[in-house]
Every structure is written in structure tokens, then in C-alpha cells.
């Protein structure tokens, strides 16, 4: 089995990718700033060469901060990761990304598109895996609102998927041959944010007051049109948001 480095290996997706790879028998290195064994910093390049030395595959599951610094981590850091991987002979570069980023006018998504461009423009054979929003991240938003006894009543259409299912798919991709294309995984169902908030309230038994959330301009039109969903993904997750919530109890 190959040796696989997972950049962002302690994050929401990276943990799941690393766990799935280990279950398949791969030798896994969990790379992050807080890693006790393979500390790296994509913003500076510190530790990258040493962490990747001897690896066959690198999975970039890193997550940039929601600010102007995202480009430093994801794009500039992507260049650093690619160069270090090239120097030590990595043969497959897998990049985790997000469904619909080319159709959704958000600054962070523009950075993710640039990050994908770095991977596509590199010399290492590659595969990009785009996923829809994770149940975990969606629930973080809704639980935060629920603490104030409110629920966002918005018509944005989402197709959430369990991070564990995405991690399993990314692990399979990492252990396979580079495809040189973008592959997708999406959740089983499409719901509006209003509907997802109602599902959470029903499962948790916590009542909240629906608060209308306006979605103006191009971003609102894109979200209402389902830009962050995919009707024909390569893989469709099986765990619904409702089922995932039930497992958290």
C-alpha cells in the first residue's frame, strides 16, 4: 500500500480521509500545524519537504480561513505543497474542493477555483474531488442560530453530505490512479435551508423561531437556483441530514 500524506489531516474532512485510508491499510501521515508527528505550515512552507519525503500520494484537505488570508493558505500554500511534492517524487496529487464554486459569487469560492488551477497546472498527475456542504458544517450554522432560539428561514438550496462519506470517497480516489478530472460527491437529498432548520428542530425537539434571511443579488439567485447542488454526482451519499442528526444523540 502507498504512503499518503493528508494536508489538513486534523480538520473536519482530513480526519475522515486519514481514518478511511488507515482502514484500507495505507501508511498515513496527518499533516497540519498542530500535528505532533508531521507539523507543517502551508502559509510559509515550513515542514513540507520533510513531511512529504517518501510519500506516494498527497491529499490536500486543507481549509483556509474565511478572510483575505485564505489565498495565502490555499493558493500560495498549494503552490508550496505542489513544489515540495514534486521534489520528493509524489505521483498523485488529490485536491478536495466544493461543488458549484464557479457558479457561486463568493470570495472564498474564487480562491478555491484558484487552488484547483494550481493543481491542474502542476506537473504531478492529479484528481480533484468536489463535495457538497458537510452535515457537520451545516449543523454548526444551525446549532449556532438555535442557541438564540431562532432558525434561518432562507430559500437557499443545499445538498448536505456526511464528511465520513466524503472522506471514504477521497480515500478511494487517493489509492487509485490519477484521473486528471474533477469528480463529485453529493448528499442524498436537496433541501432549502428553511427545510433543513425544520428537520433539525424536529429531530432535536428544540423549538426555534423562523427568521427570514434575505438572499439578494447574484449570490441569492445562485443559491436559490441550487448552484451548490449536483443532480448527477459521480457518487451520491446515503446518509441524510436527519439520519446524521439522529446519530449525534
Image (spheres, helix red, strand yellow):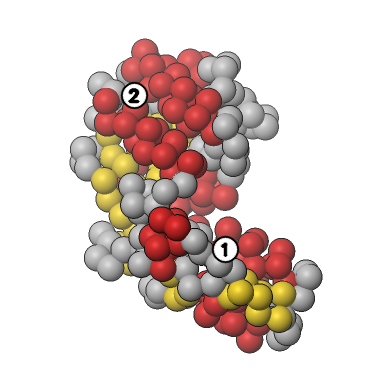
- Residue 88 is marked as none
Asked whether 71 or 48 is in front, the reply is 71
Q: Residue at x 32, y 42 (%)?
A: 128
Measured along the vertical axis of the image, is residue 22 above or below residue 126?
A: below
Quadrant of image for the C terminus: bottom right
Q: Is residue 179 left or right of residue 14?
A: left
Task: Single out the residue that lies furthest toward the right.
Answer: 148
Q: Is residue 54 visible?
A: no
SS at badge 1: helix
Q: Nearer the N terminus, badge 1 or badge 2?
A: 2
Q: Quadrant of residue 147?
A: bottom right
Asked whether 85 or 194 is in front, the reply is 194
Q: Residue at x 34, y 17 (%)?
A: 86
Measured along the vertical axis of the image, is residue 178 above or below residue 173?
A: above
Q: Residue at x 66, y 75 (%)?
A: 211
Quadrant of image for the N terminus: top left
Q: Please state the horizontal and vertical placement of residue 71, each as a whole percent of the image.
A: 50, 30
Asked whether 78 or 224 is in front, the reply is 224
- Residue 90 is marked as 2
Task: Single out the residue that lies furthest toward the front.
Answer: 217
Q: Please state the horizontal and vertical placement of residue 192, each as a whole percent of the image.
A: 47, 74
SS at badge 2: loop
Q: Residues within 10 Å of mark 1 (few under 14, many from 20)?
A: some
**Residue contact between numbered discs 1 and 2, judged by CB atoms under 8 Å:** no
Q: Which residue is mark 1?
A: 138
Q: Nearer the viewer, mark 1 or mark 2?
A: 1
Q: Residues within 10 Å of mark 2 (few under 14, many from 20)?
A: many
Asked whether 245 or 195 is in front, the reply is 195
Q: CA distance from mark 1 to mark 2?
A: 34 Å
Amino acid at each position: 500500500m502507498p504512503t499518503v500524506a493528508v494536508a489538513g489531516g486534523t480538520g473536519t474532512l482530513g480526519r475522515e480521509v486519514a481514518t478511511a485510508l488507515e482502514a484500507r491499510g495505507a501508511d498515513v501521515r496527518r499533516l497540519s500545524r498542530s500535528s505532533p508527528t508531521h507539523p507543517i505550515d502551508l502559509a510559509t512552507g515550513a515542514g513540507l519537504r520533510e513531511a512529504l519525503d517518501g510519500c506516494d500520494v498527497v491529499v490536500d484537505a486543507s481549509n483556509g480561513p474565511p478572510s483575505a488570508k485564505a489565498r495565502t493558505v490555499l493558493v500560495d500554500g498549494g503552490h508550496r505543497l505542489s513544489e515540495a511534492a514534486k521534489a520528493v517524487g509524489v505521483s498523485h496529487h488529490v485536491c478536495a474542493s466544493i461543488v458549484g464554486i464557479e457558479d457561486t459569487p463568493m470570495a472564498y469560492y474564487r480562491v478555491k477555483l484558484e487552488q484547483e488551477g494550481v493543481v491542474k497546472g502542476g506537473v504531478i498527475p492529479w484528481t480533484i474531488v468536489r463535495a457538497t456542504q458537510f452535515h457537520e458544517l451545516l449543523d454548526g450554522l444551525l446549532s449556532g442560530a438555535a442557541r438564540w432560539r431562532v432558525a434561518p428561514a432562507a430559500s437557499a438550496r443545499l445538498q448536505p453530505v456526511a464528511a465520513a462519506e466524503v472522506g471514504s470517497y477521497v480515500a478511494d480516489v487517493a489509492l487509485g490512479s490519477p484521473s486528471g478530472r474533477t469528480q463529485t460527491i453529493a448528499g442524498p437529498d436537496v433541501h432549502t435551508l428553511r427545510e433543513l432548520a425544520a428537520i433539525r428542530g424536529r429531530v432535536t425537539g428544540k423549538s426555534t423561531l423562523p427568521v427570514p434571511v434575505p438572499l439578494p443579488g447574484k449570490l441569492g439567485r445562485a443559491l436559490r437556483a441550487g448552484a451548490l447542488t449536483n443532480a448527477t454526482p459521480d457518487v451520491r451519499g446515503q446518509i441524510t441530514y436527519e439520519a446524521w442528526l439522529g446519530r449525534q444523540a
